[in-house]
Image: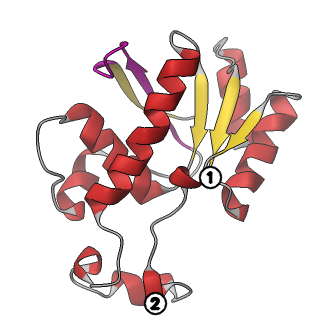
Amino acid sequence: MEKLALFFQKQGIKPVVIYASPLKRTIQSVEEILKIFPNMPVICETDLQEVDCGKFTGRKLSWVHSLDSFYALPTMESPEKIGHRMLTVMKKILKNYCGKTVFVVSHGDPIIFLLWLLTHPNSAINPVSLIKKNFLIQKGQAWKVVLNEKMKVIDLQHPMAP
């Protein structure tokens, strides 16, 4: 994340604020960004958190990936719910920081559901395997998303990485 922040700095990209999931691993990522952009305000938003796995929380990723339809499990938070809670944060960001650069630090699947809803506003969320063909999120990578005041995507660049 520090390399990514340096990349942005060299590109002349500086955020006015950082929005982040309050979970430990995202806060650690934010701390790396703050090495390059010290004293940047950080706003923790619970709606940016990882997928709520219900009773499956704490299972190893190898177990999770062995499931054919992880999001079809009855205690799982649905992709639609995840995407819409992420959209709630985006609306807040757009209201408060329209025209400004904001870094959002969250988790892979919630981000891909958000990207899907932003780029396909009138369609249901496709199965995860299909979405990941278009929006595969890698660690230490960023996506530039520029929205107009109506939350329509006017520029999308991916991946941005050092």
* Amino acid on which the number 1 mark rests in the picture: Ser
Q: Check residue 100 for magenta coloring.
A: no
Residue 159 visible in the displayed image: no
Magenta region, residue range = 141-154
Residue 74: x percent and y percent?
27, 85
Residue bearing mark 1: 21
Residue located 22% across and 78% down the image: 72
Does residue 103 lie above or below 130 as drawn?
above
Closest to the observer, 7 or 28? 28
Residue 35: x percent and y percent?
86, 36
| Secondary structure of residue under mark 1 | loop
Residue bearing mark 2: 55
Residue 12: x percent and y percent?
67, 11
Q: Splitting the image into 4 quarters, where does residue 5 fall?
A: top right
Residue 87 visible in the displayed image: yes
Q: Check residue 151 for magenta coloring.
A: yes
Left of 34 or right of it: where is 7?
left
Residue located 61% across and 31% down the image: 103
